Amino acid sequence: MEDTNSLIAQRRANLATLEAKGIHPFRNKFTPDSGCGEAREKFEKGELAEGHPVAIAGRITAHRDMGKSQFVDLRDVTGRIQVYAQKAALGDEAFEVFRCLDLADFVGARGTLFRTRTGEPSLKLESFTVLGKALRPPPAKWEGLADTEIRYRQRYLDLMSNEDVKKTFLLRSSVIREIRSFFHERGYVEVETPMMQGIPGGAAAQPFKTFHNALGCEFYLRIALELYLKRLLVGGIDKVFEIGRNFRNEGLSRRHNPEFTMLEAYESYGDYATMMETVESLIRQVARRVLGTEVIEHKTAEGQVYKTIDLTFWRRARYKDLVREKAGADWFDVTPAERRRRAIEDLKLAGDIADGYEDFEVTGAVFEKLVEPTLIQPTFVTHLPKQLVPLAKLSPDDPTTVEVFECCINGQEISPGYTEQNDPIAQREALEHQAGGEQQKLDEDFLVALEHGMPPAGGIGIGIDRLCMMLLGQESIRDVILFPQLKPKG
């Protein structure tokens, strides 16, 4: 703490020196005509000749004092370039000002491009403007932060010091932009639906509660987008999608954050097979256009490939068949009591099966713990138990299942998809069963909408955060969310 305080004091002293010279960093303006990395790249490619004048602006990430000359690295979102400052070129007064600059300060620089004796593309400084003074020192190493708590709580330091982290979030932005392009190209309409809802529907999850003072009643932060989007199918918008935040008042883990980003899309006259094609085409197109490849490599910090995901082949397998592979060919032929015994004793899932679990939940634990983590390559798991998805239609060939898929990649669910239930009578029965007879849990507005007639449709949801984990080679959801949920300090 003492070292940090002394560094802060020195930076404040440098600020005072600048102000005494009539230089006020926080008042100055500067308009660059090129990015730092952009100018360097164009010079290296020969698109800009030696001696070409440029104006750049960025943060100082390295500073080398050579006496009568100074070298600094300026960096912006496009990359880095070295700036060479000479006392003879700038003059005594400006050179002394330049020497007052610290790491992490912002500077606008004008000059000409050249190569140093070592061949480094650089800017020969002719004039500069101090644009911002960092009163606190940057992280000790620009290569990155080792303290995970600081990385997540003070993400700006992580972005400042780690180019790979910044690249991940820039790519995430490109992924979302490409998802939007995909649906727009297919004629979908993008919409926004309420985040505060009187009844949180569309999924089985614990909601966050809030209170609306003017209306004098409780509201819930939404747990899913589904029920409002289906109202739009009733209203005649035949292809609709939304990308937005959902909120679930549940635990935090490597794969879960209480606030997360979801895509949901619905297409009239489609079904679960239609939506499987949509998911596969979407993810493959995003990979091609954003990453330039459909073969995704996950690498260690040292650059060693430890996992490869091939998006050119998508397996289809029934839920029951996958469970049988892990739990035994006769799993669905024995009694519920025997299934429970096997799961607890033979499959060692005692810690994952609560006392009150129904039979389908026991099988669900087998799938979640023993099957799903093994599905690294793209797999559509189809025909799930009807109790899991009350908003989908029953399978004609097996009424114990529904026309549903879960797209699993990288050992986790990326996207569910349904043949949506549009029968208002069957839908009411299914939701009543899910609510356990509690009438206040039913979204009557949604059920009334269905009674006005909803076309047959297919629907999907895609967890954007998990999709980005898979595409960008990240093993924790916190590494693809800029500001993941943390317990407040103190």
Image (tube, rainbow, N blue to C red):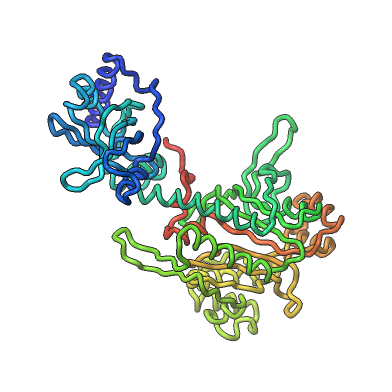
Residue 98 shown left or right of residue 266 in the figure: left
- Pick the front one: 444 or 139: 139
x then y, percent, for residue 401: 70, 74
Q: Residue at x 60, y 54 (%)?
A: 181
| Figure check: 473 above or below 138 | below
**Looking at the picture, how far across and down is residue 321, in whole percent?**
59, 80
Q: Farthest residue toward the left?
A: 67
Q: Residue at x 54, y 81 (%)?
A: 325
Above or below 278: residue 210: above
**Residue 73 at least partly seen:** no
Q: Quadrant of residue 1?
A: top left
Does 33 sit above or below residue 325? above
Q: Is residue 156 left or right of residue 435?
A: left
Q: Residue at the location (38% across, 22% down)? A: 28
Q: Is residue 14 visible?
A: yes
Above or below for 348 versus 23: below
Residue situated in front as seen by the camera: 346 or 191: 191
Residue 381 in which image quadrant: bottom right
Q: Quadrant of residue 438?
A: bottom right
The residue located at (77%, 53%) in the rendering is 237
Closest to the observer, 274 or 425: 274
**How many numbered marks, from 0 up?**
0
Quadrant position of the C terminus in the picture: top left
Q: Position of residue 348 (x, y in %)?
A: 48, 73
